Image: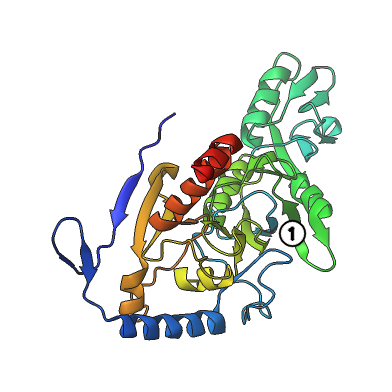
Amino acid sequence: MNRRIRMICRHPEVEHGVGNTIRTNKKWGTAILGLLILIVTALGVGGCGGPSGYGKGVPNLSVASPPAIPAAYLIGAGDELEVLYYIDPDVDVPEYRIDSEDTLRVDFYYYPVMSKTLSVRPDGYITLPPIGDVKARNKKPTDLAREISELYAPILAKPVVTVEVIAFNTKIEELKRAIYNQERGMSRLAVVRPDGVISLPYIGDVKAADLTTHQLQEQLHRRYANILYNLSTTVVVLNARSNRIYVLGEVERPDFYELLGPTTLTQLLATAGGLTREAKTDQVIIVRRGKNGQPDAHIVYMNQIIGEASLLDPMLQQYDVIYVPRSAMARAALTADFLWRIVPLRFTVDYNLN
């Protein structure tokens, strides 16, 4: 499937000469001074960390504190989440409906000897002799009392019946037992599986990948509302394994890097060891997720960033892909070297002799 990439370019101020020649207005001395300032700044306050074994010589002041996770962070595979549960007393609960394992008191006003206490079976039924099984689950107590009265009408002269729920919310008690621990209270730890799903009590599998914590909370609320009306949840990201950016092309250490805090493009390039000699130093491409997951390609002019003393240095985001292209001279040298390697040896010997 072809994906259209939208190009968003930042153009420096240039002067066009004869033909295709382009000259920048900035002095080389100013550019070099600005570059030194940027490198010192990037090395001093770099906000991203490389994988194990990379970037050992790059100071990182963010390592000592927990990484900052932005509100727009998208949950991904491998992330460690904590789901906090609590009962919200301010939720408007509709009239209660009987559930399995509830305890009911069925009273016959004129026939107290027939009154009894019953437990709703897992299949949702209660047993009333001599009527037999009567479905109680998902019914309001008043509706069940009316139905029982109608069932006993052929047998009793005045079957006035009331139904009282004397023990309920057994699911909440079961949930408390399933999730409670002394260290964290009512909470559940969950690791996002490679398929982007987490598993939680009562509702089973829930898709978490590519959602913010707020979006996941809303989804959990809808799922749990079908079972427990006044149960609310809060989702916390304990360990963000997907807060990554990827660096490709002409840098010393191309790899993925963890975002440990606000990080600019220059800081990232410094963390990746800087540009190679073959790099095209004036342009860097940032591929970023756009709307509906479509990629947007941003061309950043490094000379402009250096000349403006980093005022235009872009902040990086989760899942950004940074590509540093090879310069035209380096491409030409690589092509010549490749052709030299594939030319037959006999041809080169004959050429040298002649």
What residue sits 46% from the left and 53% below the top? 333
- Comparing 130 with 219, the one in front is 219
Answer yes or no: is residue 246 visible.
Answer: yes
Tell me residue 191's x, y (percent): 73, 51
The amino acid on which the numbered mark 1 sits, given as a three-letter code, is Ser
- Comparing 181 with 289, the one in front is 289
In the rendered view, tell whether residue 190 sits above or below residue 139. Answer: below
| Left-right relation of 59 to 184 | left
How many numbered discs?
A: 1
Tell me residue 60's x, y (percent): 63, 79
What residue sits 49% from the left and 80% below the top? 39
How busy is the neighbourhood of tag 1: few (under 14 within 10 Å), some, or many (20 plus)? many
- Comparing 16 with 341, the one in front is 341
Answer yes or no: is residue 116 visible.
Answer: no
Tell me residue 226's x, y (percent): 61, 39
Q: Quadrant of the N terminus?
A: top left
Tag 1, which secondary structure? strand
Q: Which residue is mark 1?
A: 187
| Left-right relation of 316 to 178 | left
